[in-house]
């Protein structure tokens, strides 16, 4: 069984950076809320939503990249390349729906 530290080692290492990014995303979402409360123009709301979506997608891509580097590359080196590929495909399908 893999320990919790081994599963999340990369996120613990980059925790400060990731938390800063999520705080910026929270600020973007709050800006959407304020804009909607202020009955702003639709284009302003869409612009803010697009920025928030881009920030979330970038965060997801960074965590996914870390997952591939930290967890899947070792499996490929260990000879279970097909298993690693299957896991990567599952991760991509799960998070990019």
Image (cartoon, rainbow, N blue to C red):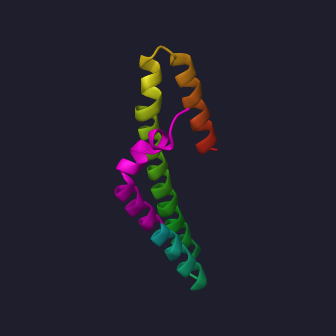
Q: Classify residue 24 by image quadrant.
A: bottom left
Is residue 57 toward the left or the right of residue 20 in the image?
right
Quarter of the image for the C terminus: give it.
top right
Quadrant of the rendered image containing residue 45 = bottom right
Query: Is 45 placed left or right of 76 in the picture?
Result: right
Of 11 and 38, nearer the camera is 11
Q: Which residues are magenta?
A: 1-25
- Please give the count of numbered marks on the rendered protein: 0
- Name the outermost residue toward the bottom: 38
Please state which of residues 83 and 12 is positioned toward the viewer in this rendering.
12
Pick the quarter of the image with the N terminus. top right
Question: What is the x, y in percent for residue 51?
Answer: 47, 62
- Tell me if 26 is positioned left or right of 36 in this view: left
Which residue is depicted at the point 59% across and 25% down?
Answer: 86
The picture places residue 25, in percent across and down from the top left corner, at 46, 64
Question: Taking the image as drawn, is residue 84 in sight?
Answer: yes
Q: Is residue 26 above or below residue 74?
A: below
Q: Specify whether residue 2 is painted magenta.
A: yes
Q: Main secondary structure of the magenta part?
A: helix
x, y percent for residue 58: 44, 50
Q: Nearer the viewer, residue 39 or 21?
A: 21
Closer-to-camera residue (29/45): 29
- Asked if residue 96 can be seen in this view, the reply is no
Residue at image position (41%, 18%) is: 77
State the residue at coordinates (59%, 79%).
36
Q: Is residue 50 magenta?
A: no
Point out residue 44 in the picture as x, y percentages from the top left corner. 51, 73
The structure residue drawn at horizontal position 43% and vertical position 67%, both measured from the top left corner, is 23
């Amino acid at each position: 069984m893999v320990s919790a530290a081994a599963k999340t080692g990369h996120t613990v290492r980059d925790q400060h950076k990731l938390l800063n990014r999520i705080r910026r995303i929270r600020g973007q979402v709050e800006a959407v809320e304020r804009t909607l409360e202020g009955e702003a123009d639709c284009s302003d709301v869409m612009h803010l939503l697009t920025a928030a979506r881009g920030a979330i997608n970038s965060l997801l891509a960074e965590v996914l990249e870390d997952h591939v580097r930290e967890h899947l590359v070792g499996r490929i080196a260990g000879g279970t390349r097909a298993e690693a590929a299957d896991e990567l495909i599952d991760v991509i399908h799960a998070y990019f729906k």
